[in-house]
Image (cartoon, rainbow, N blue to C red):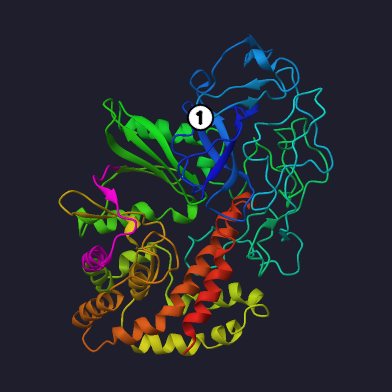
C-alpha cells in the first residue's frame, strides 16, 4: 500500500506560499514525515482521501522555516519575492520545493488563486474525496485560469456535526484530566461533534457556508472559524491557518516546531534536528551531532500525555536501564531523551516478548506494593472507569449485537476480576515489541510511556500476547502465547500468593478491548476534527472485539 502526499506550504507568519504536487514517501503511515524536504516542518493533517491510515492521498500543512533550503529559486522573480519557473509564466505559476515536486504560487504574490467554486471544493480529512488526482501533476490554478481543483470520488462520509447519533462531548469544567483517567474530557468550547456511532468510515463535520479567502484554504488565512466549523467532503479546509485551535497540540501550530527545536538544541549544542513523525499523539525529532550520529530525541506530546516524563523518572529510580534516559523536561509537553542504541523490534517473536514480560514484572510488582507515586498518573482502575465504559458504548447499543448485554454484565465481571486477587499497578498501556529497543548486547529499553496508567496488570500481558507484534491493536495472537501467559501467571502467583492470575487474564481479555475503545474515544474528544481519521474506526472496532472476546 502506498501513500502520496501534498504539502500546503505556509510562511512562519501564516502566509500561504503554495502547494506541492503529489509525491510518494517510502512509508505509507500518515504520521511518518521523515524526509519530506529540508527547510520545512510538517505541522498537521489537513485532508485525506481514505477514512484512515495507512496509504491513500494525504495533505498536510507544512511551515517553511528556511526558504533557501526548501524552494529552488529558478526563473524570474515574483512580486512576493518568490521565484517562478520559466515554463510556468502565466496561469498556474509554480514554485518548486526541492525534492517534493512543484508548488502552486500563492495568493499575495501577484498571482492569486481562484475562490472556491461550487462543487470544486477540497475534501475533508477522512472523506473519500481526493484533494487532487494522485499523480495528475495539477494543483490549484492561478488567477485567470478556468480550472479549479477537482474533487474526485463520491464520498459517502457520515455526518457527525448535528447528528443525533454523535457521541456527546463531555461537559466542560475544570482542568482536563489525562486521557485514560476514566474521566470524560471536555470538548473545549469548539462545538466539534464526535464521530457518529457506527460510522465505521469517513467523517464529515459542519462545512463552511461562505467566507473562503481567494485561495480556498481557510478564512482569510488569519480569521477564526466559527465554533463547529470544520471540513467536509465538499468543503475547503475551514479552520484558519494562523489562528490556534483549542484542541491542537502546540507542536502543530505555526512556530511550534521551531520553538521546540530551539529548546532542544540549546540543551544539546551542536546538533541538528530531523523531523521524523508528527500527529495528534506526539511529534518526534532525532538530534544528530556534526558527524550525523544520533545523540538525542526530542519528543513532544499533547497535554493528555503530559505525565510521560514523570513515569520515566519514576521507573528510572528503580530500573534505570529499562527506560530511555530523560535529559530534560520542558513546557508544552516537551521532553529530551538520550539516544538509545539499537532497533525498534516491530514484529519480534515469542522469545523477545517473554524477555519483555519478565523484565517489566519487577516494575509492576514494585508499584503494586508501593502505589503512592501512581497518584500522579491517569487512573484506569476498574472501579473508576465503569461509567465511562457505559458512556462510550451506549451510542452503539442498537447497531452492535451483544454490546448492551456485555456492558450490563460489567459490574459482575469486575467483581470476579477483583476476587482473583491481583493488585492494581503501573500499566505501560501499549506494550508491544515496536515500543521496545534492543542493542547489540540484547539490552532492552522500553519506550513510549504516554499511555501509562494505574490499572490491572493483565492489560499489558494481553497487549503483548493477543495483538499484532507489528504494533496493531488486534491480530491473530502471538505464537507461543500460552507459554508466555503461564510464565506471567507463575510470576504473579509468587508475588501475590493465593491469587488466581489465570482466571484474571481470562476475565480481562474483553475488558482490554473495551479499554482500547475508551482510550480512542477520549483521543477523539481531545483532538481537532481534521485529526479524527487517525482514530475514528478504533472505537467501534474495540467494542466489537470486546463483545466477541466475551462470548463463551
Residue 83 visible in the current orientation:
yes
In which image quadrant can residue 253 be found? Answer: top right
What residue span does the magenta drawing correspond to?
338-360
Quadrant of res 512: bottom left
Residue 123 relative to residue 468: left or right: right
Q: Is 158 or 322 nearer to us in this picture? A: 158
Q: Give the residue at x 45% y 68%.
A: 474
**Residue 409 location in percent, x, y?**
52, 88
The residue positioned 43% from the left and 68% from the top of the image is 475
The residue identified by callout 1 is 40
Residue 423 drawn at (x, y percent): 31, 79
Reply above or below: 438 against 18.
Answer: below
Q: Is residue 192 visible?
A: no
Q: Residue at x 54, y 41 (%)?
A: 252
Which residue is nearer to you in this view: 136 or 114?
A: 136
Q: Secondary structure at mark 1?
A: strand
Amino acid at each position: 500500500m502506498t501513500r502520496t502526499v501534498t504539502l500546503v506550504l505556509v510562511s512562519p507568519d501564516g502566509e500561504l506560499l503554495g502547494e506541492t504536487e503529489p509525491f510518494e514517501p517510502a512509508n505509507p503511515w500518515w504520521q511518518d514525515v521523515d524526509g519530506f524536504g529540508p527547510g520545512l516542518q510538517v505541522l498537521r493533517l489537513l485532508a485525506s482521501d481514505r477514512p484512515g491510515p495507512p496509504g491513500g492521498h494525504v495533505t498536510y500543512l507544512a511551515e517553511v522555516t528556511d526558504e533557501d533550503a526548501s524552494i529552488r529559486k529558478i526563473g524570474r522573480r515574483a512580486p512576493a519575492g518568490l521565484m517562478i519557473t520559466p515554463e510556468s509564466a502565466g496561469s498556474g505559476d509554480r514554485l518548486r520545493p526541492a525534492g517534493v515536486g512543484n508548488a502552486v504560487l500563492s495568493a499575495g504574490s501577484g498571482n492569486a488563486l481562484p475562490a472556491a467554486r461550487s462543487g470544486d471544493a477540497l475534501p475533508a480529512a477522512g472523506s473519500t474525496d481526493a484533494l487532487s488526482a494522485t499523480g495528475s501533476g495539477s494543483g490549484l490554478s492561478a488567477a485567470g485560469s478556468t480550472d479549479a481543483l477537482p474533487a474526485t470520488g463520491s464520498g459517502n462520509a457520515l455526518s457527525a456535526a448535528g447528528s443525533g447519533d454523535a457521541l456527546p462531548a463531555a461537559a466542560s469544567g475544570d482542568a482536563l484530566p489525562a486521557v485514560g483517567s476514566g474521566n470524560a474530557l471536555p470538548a473545549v468550547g469548539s462545538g466539534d461533534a464526535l464521530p457518529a456511532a457506527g460510522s465505521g468510515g469517513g467523517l464529515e463535520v459542519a462545512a463552511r457556508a461562505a467566507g473562503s479567502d481567494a485561495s480556498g484554504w481557510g478564512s482569510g488565512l488569519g480569521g477564526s472559524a466559527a465554533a463547529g466549523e470544520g471540513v467536509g467532503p465538499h468543503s475547503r479546509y475551514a479552520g484558519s491557518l494562523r489562528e490556534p485551535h483549542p484542541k491542537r497540540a502546540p507542536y502543530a501550530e505555526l512556530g511550534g516546531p521551531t520553538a521546540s527545536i530551539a529548546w532542544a538544541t540549546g540543551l544539546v549544542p551542536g546538533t541538528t534536528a530531523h523531523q521524523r513523525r508528527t500527529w495528534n499523539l506526539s511529534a518526534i525529532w532525532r538530534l544528530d551531532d556534526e558527524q550525523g550520529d544520533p545523540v538525542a530525541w526530542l519528543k513532544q506530546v499533547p497535554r493528555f500525555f503530559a505525565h510521560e516524563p514523570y513515569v520515566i523518572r519514576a521507573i528510572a529510580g528503580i530500573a534505570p536501564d529499562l527506560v530511555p534516559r530523560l535529559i530534560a523536561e520542558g513546557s508544552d509537553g516537551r521532553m529530551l531523551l538520550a539516544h538509545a542504541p539499537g532497533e525498534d523490534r516491530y514484529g519480534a517473536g515469542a522469545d523477545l516478548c517473554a524477555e519483555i514480560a519478565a523484565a517489566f514484572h519487577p516494575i509492576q510488582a514494585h508499584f503494586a506494593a508501593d502505589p503512592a507515586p501512581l497518584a500522579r498518573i491517569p487512573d484506569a482502575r476498574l472501579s473508576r472507569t465503569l461509567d465511562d465504559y457505559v458512556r462510550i458504548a451506549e451510542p452503539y447499543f442498537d447497531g452492535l449485537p451483544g454490546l448492551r448485554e456485555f456492558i450490563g454484565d460489567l459490574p459482575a465481571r469486575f467483581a470476579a476480576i477483583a476476587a482473583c486477587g491481583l493488585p492494581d499497578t503501573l500499566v505501560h498501556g501499549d506494550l508491544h515489541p515496536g515500543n521496545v529497543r534492543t542493542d547489540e548486547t540484547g539490552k532492552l529499553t522500553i519506550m513510549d510511556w504516554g499511555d501509562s496508567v494505574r490499572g490491572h496488570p493483565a492489560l499489558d500481558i494481553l497487549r503483548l500476547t493477543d495483538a499484532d507484534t507489528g504494533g496493531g491493536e488486534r491480530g491473530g495472537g502471538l505464537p507461543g502465547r500460552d507459554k508466555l501467559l503461564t510464565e506471567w501467571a507463575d510470576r504473579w502467583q509468587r508475588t501475590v500468593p493465593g491469587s488466581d492470575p489465570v482466571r484474571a487474564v481470562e476475565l480481562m481479555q474483553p475488558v482490554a478491548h473495551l479499554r482500547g475503545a475508551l482510550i480512542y474515544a477520549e483521543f477523539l474528544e481531545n483532538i481537532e476534527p481534521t485529526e479524527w481519521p487517525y482514530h475514528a474506526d478504533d472505537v467501534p472496532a474495540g467494542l466489537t472485539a470486546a463483545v466477541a472476546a466475551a462470548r463463551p
